[in-house]
Amino acid sequence: MVTFDDEKEERELADVKESEEEDLIQFLAEKHGLPYINLFPLSIENDALRLVNEADARAAKLAPFAINGKKVDVAIFTPNTTTVQAALQKLTAAGYAVDLYLTSTKSLNKAWSHYQEISHATVSHAGTVDMSVNAVKEAATNIKHLADVIPQIEAVISSKEQNRISRLVETILGAAIALDASDIHIEPEESFVQLRLRLDGILQEVLKFDRATYALVNSRIKILSGLKLNLKEEAQDGRFSIDLGDKAIEIRTSLLPGAYGESIVLRLLDPKSISVPLESLGMHPLLLAAVEKEIAKPNGMLLTTGPTGSGKTTTLYAFLRKIHVPGVKIITIEDPIEYHLPGITQTQVEVAKHYTFVSGLRAALRQDPDVIMVGEIRDEETAAIAINASLTGHLVFSTLHTNNAAGTFPRLIDLGVNAKTISSAITLAMAQRLVRKLCPVCKKETSISFAGASRFEKILASLPADAQPENKTKMWIPVGCDKCNKTGYKGRTGVYEAIRADERIEKVVRENPSGREIENAARPQGIPNMMQDGILKVLTGITSLEELERVINLES
């Protein structure tokens, strides 16, 4: 005798119907030219739901599920009913730009279930995350060290709150801000997702969490950043800001598709990190004096070089703040604008709109500037215009990709710039790196070995007598304590070198523009090179020899 399990049959029939509905909705989405969306993997934003009351949402079979400023994403079951059109007209009349997605009734029911939680939701608006009252204050209170982050995040992940994903993203951001992290890395692997924070230039592992949570975090970050939710096979870049009341921290979002999902990197642009006075950058007094002399001139070109993340932008902004007075017109062409400087005209390269460094430079010169900052010299045309600007009465700041200061001159020649013109235009060529500073609380003094002392003596031999260090027998090493997250380091400083374009340099550039010859010609200027500047910082306890060797080759 055959027995029937009615409940099982009903469940299977329901599953079939749901599957068929999803297939039908995807077909109709193509027909109507609308994107299809499945709301189950997404975090429904309560702020979006607030825009349409529950009764109207159910009557129209729609659900606002994401909001970014005045842009709202709305999932609908069908586009052409009068109730849908009426609801959308209300949103449009309220000033919202609406992006429509077709979805199933199952997805809508999932979204509607969040109406009961609306009263408990936090508010986000105008492309910003209002974290000042909740997450950031909590992070400032509870997160003092890297180890404090783990229980905070684990508690949110394991919670049953309807808005736990929003809380998780806010907790991660709050922790990064509390610890002065420059970047947040969320990296999916086959069976887990790794969260890392970049502290003082070094990535530090925080914790691993599950891939299901990652999928929701991914969607939340995309929504905040104004990115496409259903685009997973292409790189995407976006941005949003965090309003802390006294300041706004801008977040640059980068998503890169990988084998196990999209790698997410959030760069935190904190205004305080860029507000470093010229005198506090860590320049040797001889270099600082040379820089202050050159930036006080009405014309000329100062170039700084170094790899990505070496602090070039901070240095250029320090130049601008030093010379900025009401009587000076300053224009910048950047890619992108990382920090906004009051009283300075800043423009951003937009390649898609054919606004490049070249076109930006040409436009800037028509604005009667006194000072121009070009984010980077990448090609012959940009180099030619920038150099011509410096020769026609403008002060020009820019960056160039070379390994050292001496390499600036042959690099410009490689770009097609006339050697005779270079030495006339460039007043100072710099190179820089960033090293971590030893924690002042736990650093430990140690003696320098005989071999080490001899090595240091050789490196410092060419420095003038008045630039020689008093200490040549001891240095300091990292230990690690609660104040520095057990790393032994706290904060960063620059290691610099520079070459003035004097008569010796001009002669070499015209005759034999090799880096080595230029270095030899610059030696009488007495400005320490990067190796010497680094060793001086080791001997004064600013950084460690180990840290210096991490960023500079002392054997060359």
Image: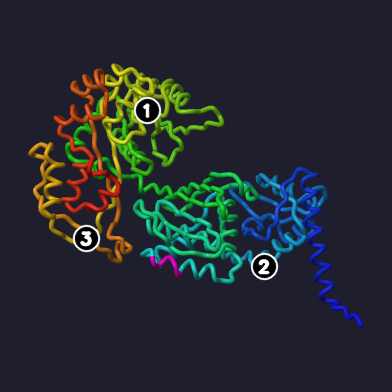
Quadrant including the C terminus: top left
Mark nearer the N terminus (1 vs 3): 1
Q: Residue at the location (48% across, 49% down)?
A: 251
| Any part of residue 367 in sight | no
Picture quadrant of residue 499: top left
Residue assigned mark 3: 443
The quarter of the picture where the N terminus appears is: bottom right
Does 297 sit above or below residue 464? Answer: above
Label whose residue precedes the other's in the sequence (2 or 1): 2
Q: Nearer the viewer, mark 3 or mark 2?
A: 3
- Residue located beneath label 2 in the image: 116
User: What residue sits right under mark 1 in the picture?
Assistant: 372
Q: Confirm whether residue 94 shows in the render.
A: yes
Q: Is residue 520 magenta?
A: no
For badge 2, the amino acid type reads Gln
Given this view, does label 1 or label 3 mark the residue nearer the observer?
3
Bounds of the magenta segment: 147-151
Q: Position of residue 246 (x, y in %)?
A: 41, 52
Q: Quadrant of residue 440?
A: bottom left
Can you tell which of label 2 and label 1 is closer to the viewer? 1
Main SS, magenta residues: helix
Residues at marks 1 and 3, CA–CA distance in whole angstroms: 42 Å
Residue 332: give x, y in percent of width and height.
40, 31
Sequence-wise first label, 3 or 2: 2
Give percent across and percent down for residue 241: 49, 49
Report the residue at 27% width, 23% height from top.
513
- Label 1, secondary structure: give it: strand
